[in-house]
Structure formats: C-alpha cells, structure tokens
Amino acid sequence: MTLDVRTIVVVLLIVVLLLSAILTLDLRSGRAPGLARWNLGLVLFSAAWLLFPLRPFLHPVVGVAFADALLLAGLCSQYAALLEFGERKVPAWLVPGPAALMFLALLPLLGSYAGLTLAVSTVYATAMAALAVVTVRLGERAGAVRWLSAAILAGASVALMARAADIWWHPAESPAVFTASALHGIAFIMLLAVTVSTSFSFLVMQRRASEARVQHIAMYDGLTELYNRRAFIEIAERELSRARRAGSPTAALMLDLDHFKRVNDERGHAAGDCVLVDFAGRLRAAVRVADIPGRYGGEEFCVLLPGASLEEACMAAERIRAAVSAAPLGGLARIVTVSIGATATPRSDCTLDELLARADSALYGAKRSGRNRVAVSSPQAAAA
Ligand code: GH3
Ligand code: MG
Ligand code: MG
C-alpha cells in the first residue's frame, strides 16, 4: 500500500475545517474553558495545511517557513487551551513566541531539504510530547480519555522522530516533501490521528467538566457550599439505612441562628450572608469528617452524625455552639448565637423524617428556654 502524503494533507485540511466549524458553533453556547484557544489552534492548522499543497507555487518563505510556523502556533494554542482547561496560567508569549522563533530559524535552512525536515520534525515531535505531558497532568478532571489522547500524541512524536532520523540517514532517498516513503505516510497518518483524537478528547473533557459543574450546583448550596436540603436528605437516607443494617446508632442536629433577622434588618442582607458563610465554616470545622452538615433552608442548618450516640451528638453540638459564640460571626460588632436541637435514633427502624422532626422539636425547646443552648430530644423521651 502506498500512502500518498498529498491526499492525507487534503483529508487533514477537510477534518480541521469541519472540527473548527463544529467548535465555532459550540463556542456560542455556555462556558467551556480553553475551547476558544483550541479552536484557534484548528484555524491555524487549516491555514497551514492549506499552504502545504500550494508549496510548488509559493516562495519557500511563505510555503515552508511561514506554513510550518503556523502549524507550531496551532500546537501551542492547543497547549494553551489545555493549560486554561486545567486552570493554569497561560503566558502571553506561548502562541506567538515559539512560532516566530521557528520562522526565523527556518529561513537559513530553506535550501536544505534534509536540514529543514529534520528541524521541523524535531520541533513538532517536541511539541507533541509536551502536549502529551500536559494532557496527562490534567489528572482525574480530564478522565480516562486523557491516557488515549496522550498515547496518540506520544505515538505521533515517535513517528515524527523516525521520519527525521530516516531523512538524516538517507538524505539521497528524500528528494521532495511529498515522497511516498512509508515513514512519511505514517508520520502524516499520525498527524491525522492526533488531530481527530485530541479534538474529540478535548470535547469529552469539556463534557465531563461541565457535568461535574452541574452536579456540584445541584448538590451544594451556592452561598455556604454546604450540602443543600435535597442532597442532605439523599445522603442522610443512605447513611441511615446503612446504620440500620449495621445495627449502629445515628444522631442528628438541627441548628438555627438566633435573632438572625435583626442582622439583616440592622446591617443589610450582604452582612447577613457573610454571617451565614462564616457560620458554615465554623460548623464544618467543628464536626467530624464522617458527619454530614447541610443547609436546611434560610438560617437553619442540620447535621447527620452516623454512628454517634446522643451523648456524642450533644458534645458535637456544644462544640459548635461554643465555636459560634466565641467571636462575632462575619466580622459583625456583636455576637450572633445559635440554638441547637440534638437527637439520636430511638429505635433501629427510625426514619429520617422522624429523626429530623425530633431534632426540630428539640431545637424549639432550645429557643423557648432562652436560645444560645443545646436541647435534647432523648430516645427515652420518645419511647415514653
Ligand atoms: P429566631 O431566633 O427565633 O430564630 O429568630 P430569627 O430572626 O433568626 O428567625 P426568623 O425566622 O424570624 O428570621 C430568619 C431570617 O433569615 C429571615 C430571612 O430574611 C433571613 N434569611 C434567610 N435566608 C437568608 C439568606 O440566604 N441570606 C440572608 N442574608 N438572610 C437570610
Ligand atoms: Mg433564627
Ligand atoms: Mg429559622
């Protein structure tokens, strides 16, 4: 089988144009970190691949040096896209810098086919290896597809190096860039594979990241970053049935900030929000890693304590109460306190609704008896 490089380049051009068109249409919808830079890379590739078959009709400065610099700029733009996707800083020189250097470095080599191809192949091989490394370094955020993407990039890097070595050792057999030697064909096929697979992988990574964002928004309260009511109930139900199977106790706390409305009335809603955020931080710090704190709604919070007895729940509640009353929340001038109702499963078949209702009634007991305190709804009380 003979691989015709010119045909592969035409296919490459069609593929990058189509990919770029798809990405351009997608760019208009929503947030996709790095997608614009990735697409710029594809546009630069299109320009480079368009110049490639026109080489016989162009001055080598344009057809060779400029076209190869465009290709490198495209690779650097995709490198920048991966940095942006990974939330890393993108230096301003990353796209124009290496491309300008390459353009200048190729000018004295334009007369030597072997030197030129060796230089170009080495630069691309290095760029592909760098892309493979930055792709793997994206970590779990990018998912398993990053390994496939990196493997194809590494394969292309090796193929380009093999092509360079071939030209170096057999310069007489390489009279023109379109030579249909197997190694050349393979190097260009690898470029095609890289273009298609890395672009699809990048879209898969974007989809994963946006699913993770949506999942986070669905589960966490936007202000306090605690579980929202729905997520809390879902997780608490799961923990409760696990505890039921294991025959271990489960405790719950209901918490409500005291006279919180006054904060809003006196200092404004924004100050109230700061108090809620500060409270959530202290709540998180005061409970165990295994405990599940959530925002039940407004200035009411809840905590499920898997495996905890009523005594342990009371100790946790007291820890939270003390942490809140130790210093003013949210940088206010005066102390805002919290009332807490604590309870534990009275029987093994206690439902979450029942557990939370018991914690809630204990909370109202704490409010009635003067606020800034922990009140208990004991298993014995319920049994009686
Ligand atoms: P009590 O001690 O009896 O609990 O009195 P309270 O003032 O804390 O209770 P009340 O239920 O009268 O007021 C709760 C206030 O919490 C009313 C509501 O405007 C405020 N609130 C609820 N959610 C938010 C929020 O996200 N941000 C701010 N700033 N305020 C909120
Ligand atoms: Mg309140
Ligand atoms: Mg309330």
Image (cartoon, grey):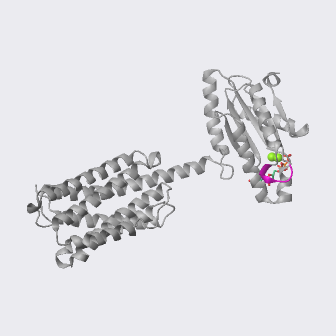
Q: Is residue 333 magenta?
A: yes
Q: Is residue 340 left or right of residue 100?
A: right
Look at 37% across and 63% down and name the residue there: 76
Q: Position of residue 365 (x, y in %)?
A: 86, 35
Image quadrant occupied by the C terminus: top right
Look at 51% across and 62% down and name the residue there: 30
Q: Position of residue 329 (x, y in %)?
A: 79, 49
Query: Does residue 165 show up?
Result: yes
Q: Quadrant of residue 185?
A: bottom left
Front residue of 92 and 82: 92
Look at 62% across and 28% down and name the residue there: 241
Q: Is residue 94 left or right of residue 344?
A: left
Q: Quadrant of residue 250?
A: top right
Query: Does residue 50 show up?
Result: no
User: In the image, which residues are magenta?
Assistant: 329-334
Front residue of 221 and 229: 221
Q: Is residue 246 left or right of residue 94?
A: right
In the depicted structure, whether residue 256 falls above or below residue 181: above
In the depicted structure, whether residue 116 falls above or below residue 85: below
Q: Is residue 48 magenta?
A: no
Q: How many numbered marks are there? A: 0
Q: Position of residue 195 (x, y in %)?
A: 31, 59
Image quadrant occupied by the N terminus: bottom left
Residue found at the far left of this picture: 172
Look at 55% across and 48% down and name the residue there: 215
Q: Position of residue 220 (x, y in %)?
A: 63, 47
Front residue of 350 and 43: 43
